[in-house]
């Protein structure tokens, strides 16, 4: 019977710790939504700005690149810049959330 009481206190402590961790995660995710990374391709001809929560905020394409009229090259450069921005954004999220989660994978955060 004594086990039940001791286990209850331990469980309450674990719940409190989990609640603190959830709050820290919520706060960190809100901060990540405000942080951005920028990736580019083609020597800066295509630039992508993405949040730490992998939302694309801006795509910039050099007018010179458009004048060339090479649609396939433009598509490739956009794809490269977007993929790099996603990678950088996921790395930023891992860096910010890692200390909170202790390396546990968080669904939807690309870790």
Image: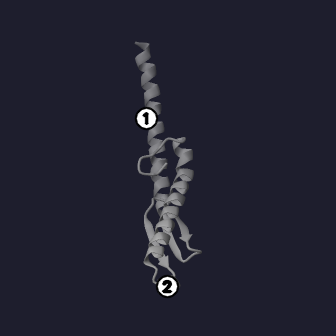
User: Residue 71: x and y, percent?
Assistant: 43, 78
x 59%, y 74%: residue: 43
User: Residue 15, labelled with which disc?
Assistant: 1
Q: Nearer the viewer, residue 51 or 99?
A: 51
* Residue position marked by numbered label 2 in the rendering: 68
Q: Quadrant of the N terminus?
A: top left
Residue projecting furthest to the right:
43
Residue at 56 percent of width and 74 percent of height: 42
* Residue 90 can be seen in this image: yes
Q: Position of residue 29 (x, y in %)?
A: 46, 55
Viewer can see residue 59: no
Question: Which circle, 2 or 1, is nearer the viewer?
Answer: 2
- The residue lying toward the viewer, choosing from 28 and 11, is 28
Which element type, helix, strand or loop, lies under badge 1?
helix
Judge the density around disc 1: few (<14), some (14-19), many (≥20) Cα neighbours within 10 Å. few
Query: Where residue 104 sits in the image (x, y, percent)?
Result: 50, 41
Disc 2 vs disc 1: Cβ atoms closer than 8 Å?
no
């Amino acid at each position: 019977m004594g086990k039940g009481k001791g286990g209850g206190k331990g469980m309450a402590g674990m719940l409190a710790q989990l609640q603190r961790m959830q709050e820290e995660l919520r706060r960190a995710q809100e901060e990540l939504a405000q942080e951005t990374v920028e990736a580019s391709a083609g020597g800066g001809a295509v630039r992508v700005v993405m949040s730490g929560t992998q939302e694309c905020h801006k795509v910039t394409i050099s007018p010179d690149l458009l004048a060339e009229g090479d649609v396939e090259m433009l598509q490739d450069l956009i794809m490269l810049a977007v993929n790099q921005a996603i990678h950088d954004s996921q790395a930023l999220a891992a860096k910010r959330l890692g200390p909170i989660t202790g390396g546990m994978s968080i669904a939807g955060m690309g870790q």
